[in-house]
Image (cartoon, rainbow, N blue to C red):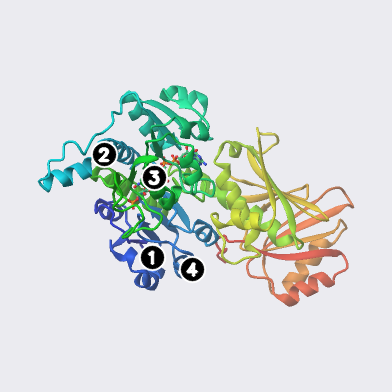
Amino acid sequence: MAPRVLVSDKLSKTAVQVFTDRGVEVDYMPDLGKDKDKLLEIIGQYDGLAIRSATKATEKLIQAATNLKVIGRAGIGVDNVDIPAASRKGIIVMNTPFGNSITTAEHAIAMMFAVARQLPAADASTQAGKWEKNRFMGVEITGKTLGVIGCGNIGSIVATRGVGLKMRVVAFDPFLSHERAAQLGIEKVELDELLKRADFISLHTPMTDKTKGIINAAAIAKMKDGVRIINCARGGLVVEADLAEGIKSGKVAGAGVDVFETEPATDSVLFGLENVVCTPHLGASTSEAQENVAVQVAEQMSDYLVRGAVSNAINMPSITAEEAPILTPFVKLAEILGGFAGQVTEEPITSVEILYDGTVAGMNTNALTSAALSGLIKSQVSDVNMVSAPIMVKERGIHVTESRRDQSGVFETYIKLTVTTETMTRSVAGTVFSDGKPRFIQIKGINLDAEVGQHMVYTTNNDAPGIIGLLGTTFGAAGVNIANFQLGRNRPGGDAIALLYLDSPMPEDLLKTVLSHKEIISAKPLRFDVAEATV
Ligand SMILES: NC(=O)c1ccc[n+]([C@@H]2O[C@H](COP(=O)([O-])OP(=O)(O)OC[C@H]3O[C@@H](n4cnc5c(N)ncnc54)[C@H](O)[C@@H]3O)[C@@H](O)[C@H]2O)c1
Ligand SMILES: O=C(O)[C@H](O)COP(=O)(O)O
């Protein structure tokens, strides 16, 4: 059945064509984002949800989204999506990080000019027939200092446009390197210095605990008299009441505000103040940007729903469409190894170590680790996948490490997963054969070569004659067919293990019978999510 996507915000209609061309059914309801109840009622029918900023993907909506696999944001900010809730539910959240950057940077520059020359007020006055030539005395931009807070995709475009306008540009961004600043022709400075030096300040950070309210009364007090502030990033970055005070006192000569603490902003302390230019979150609103983000999000969502490729996901490592088929058998292997460790380990796991050896070490190991963790935790929680597993493992305080090395043994490639609890360490390794099927090749350091089946049993015993016959007879007597039987031991007469691949699940009373044999130390039925053997 074709996957179904709901578009609940005003995306360019080109998105509909992209979805359809790629075999995805799409319902285009651009005003639905505002109708929370209706959205809640129908969201369960969809595999994908495509949004802009009007739809709020809250925890409540996510809980109701029983089939949802992906939320695609046609734009940059994902603060309208409850990412932890989506991750816990295994839903990928993706955005389009570049599609509207130029457009938004241009809006910030437009705001800077509008504020420097009071264009909106001058326009309104002129069209009202007042001809107030003396009222609208502006300032030049050339030679002024532009302070950019947050110098990522948009901030760096604003910065270079500033340089092009013959401004001196200083930027505050803890993640901006001096080399990158030099490349952009700007100066990297600390926040206080930026506040002290800038004639214009433009904000371009995401909304985080650290950036919320970054422009408040204390910050404004440190600024130059007559500073002009532009915010085309997120409303909460500026404390609106403090900015309004700054404007009223004359400390701040003007502000360009595209984003508000509460949106839609139908009322604000900033409305009606002298030289405050407001737009209704128009930063990304050009036909070019909207076409870019709509096409991109529809391509990304379709690629994921149809081909398993992941790009620009906030909560999952990327997997390209080219690598998806190569990665798939290894994703399965990693999940099986995690599944084995999760099912046989009966005490709390404190750490997991995953070793990638040989060719697999050069693959997308982030995705493989997510798959291994998903397998590991599946025995404890029913609803987990590669998106939710890392977060669940973290919540359980399990420490995860990854290592890679060049081919070190007879196998061209293998994955080894080691789990540690308070009392023991257990490892399991596996590989993918040329038939694309996963195999167990080592358990507890004991070599073997076992196919993976849907129903399996893992037993341990002291190496002694007659165990194969004993297990064979016991399973035969219970009418359970053994499809494959693999044994291994560390030394003659030492620790021995057996992995039995069964054609049907192991009945409870058969397990009791197996455990009643004094030669058998432990027996654990296992289940793996692989195709059932045809008998
Ligand atoms: N008005 C609009 O319509 C519109 C359109 C697009 C994007 N946006 C918003 O613009 C903002 C920037 O988008 P972007 O694509 O440039 O993001 P980005 O991730 O490329 O850049 C953000 C930059 O902020 C920096 N940063 C993070 N924490 C910081 C801190 N505490 N102090 C200083 N810098 C910090 C990061 O290092 C990064 O370089 C986002 O909030 C986004 O949602 C608004
Ligand atoms: O983060 C973004 O991309 C912008 O805020 C644009 O939001 P919009 O899609 O609602 O215009």
Query: Of label 4 and label 2, which has the lower sequence position?
Result: 4
Q: Quote the CA–CA distance across marks 4 and 3.
A: 48 Å
In the rendered image, residue 219, in percent from the top left (x then y), is placed at 49, 41
Quadrant (top left, top right, bottom left, bottom right) of the N terminus:
bottom left
Q: What's the amino acid at mark 1?
A: Tyr
Q: Considering depth in this image, is 42 or 371 the residue closer to the camera?
A: 42
Q: Are marks 1 and 2 in contact (CB under 8 Å)?
A: no
**Looking at the image, is mark 4 or mark 1 nearer the viewer?**
4
Query: Of label 4 and label 3, which has the lower sequence position?
Result: 4
Indicate whether 435 appears above or below 500.
Answer: above
Residue 451 seen in the current view: no
Q: Which residue is mark 2?
A: 114
Q: Are marks 1 and 3 in contact (CB under 8 Å)?
A: no
Q: Element under label 4?
A: helix
Q: Quote the CA–CA distance across marks 4 and 2.
A: 44 Å
Task: Identify the residue shown where x is 28% and y is 31%.
Answer: 139
Q: Residues within 10 Å of mark 1 (few under 14, many from 20)?
A: many
Q: Which residue is mark 3?
A: 249
Q: What's the amino acid at mark 4?
A: Gln
Q: What's the amino acid at mark 3?
A: Ser
Q: Are marks 4 and 3 in contact (CB under 8 Å)?
A: no
Q: Which residue is mark 4?
A: 63
Q: Which residue is mark 1?
A: 46
In the rendered image, residue 273, in percent from the top left (x then y), is placed at 31, 49
Quadrant (top left, top right, bottom left, bottom right) of the C terminus:
bottom right
